[in-house]
Amino acid sequence: MKFMLFCPPTLPATLAERGAAALFYRRFNRIYGFWEAFRLPGDDEKFPLAKGGLPRSEWTVERTVNAHYVFAGTVDDVRREMDTVVDAVNPEWFAWWSDQGGVPLYQVKKQLELFGTKILPQYK
């Protein structure tokens, strides 16, 4: 399993929009249709695949959070999302993918520190 985590006390939209969740999928994976993996209930009626699928206006960080791909928010928010995954599938391993390049290095370090000290110990 692979998810991206943002663990700042608050998640400014501009920070998330500069990160991998937005840039990587918008600039690279979009050509392979990866945004279709983030379909939500009701999307089939609004955005049928036969008519092109999800429009570019729907390629948002908010959509990846709502699809439970990006865990965003406070430490407690991220822990709740992790608990949901653990309860649903009991993963044998978990890969954390942090932002690289789009988000300031100090913020990436803070996210890793929070994940390693406040979240990961719960799942030993």
Image: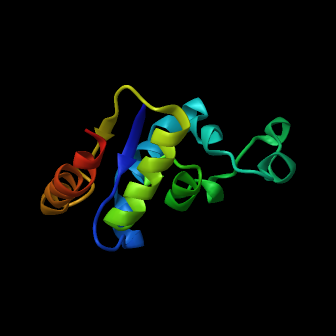
* Percent position of residue 102, x then y: 27, 54
* Residue 70 coordinates in the image, percent (x, y): 45, 51
Residue at point 35% right, 68% down? Answer: 74
In this picture, residue 120 sits left or right of residue 3: left
Residue 11 or residue 89, whichever sits in front:
89
Quadrant for residue 103, please give it: bottom left
- Figure check: 9 above or below 35: below
Query: For the N terminus, which image quadrant?
Result: top left
Residue at (20% x, 58% y) in the render: 114
Does residue 32 sit above or below 99 in this rendering? above
**Is 7 left, or right, of 2 in this rendering?**
left
Viewer can see residue 17: no
Location of residue 15 (image quadrant):
bottom left
Query: Which of 22/3 is in front?
Result: 3
Side (left or right) of 62 relative to 17: right
Q: Which residue is rendered at x = 53% and y = 52% of the image?
A: 64
Residue 26 appears left or right of 79: right
Please provide percent x and percent y for residue 22.
44, 53
Position of the C terminus, as image quadrant, is top left
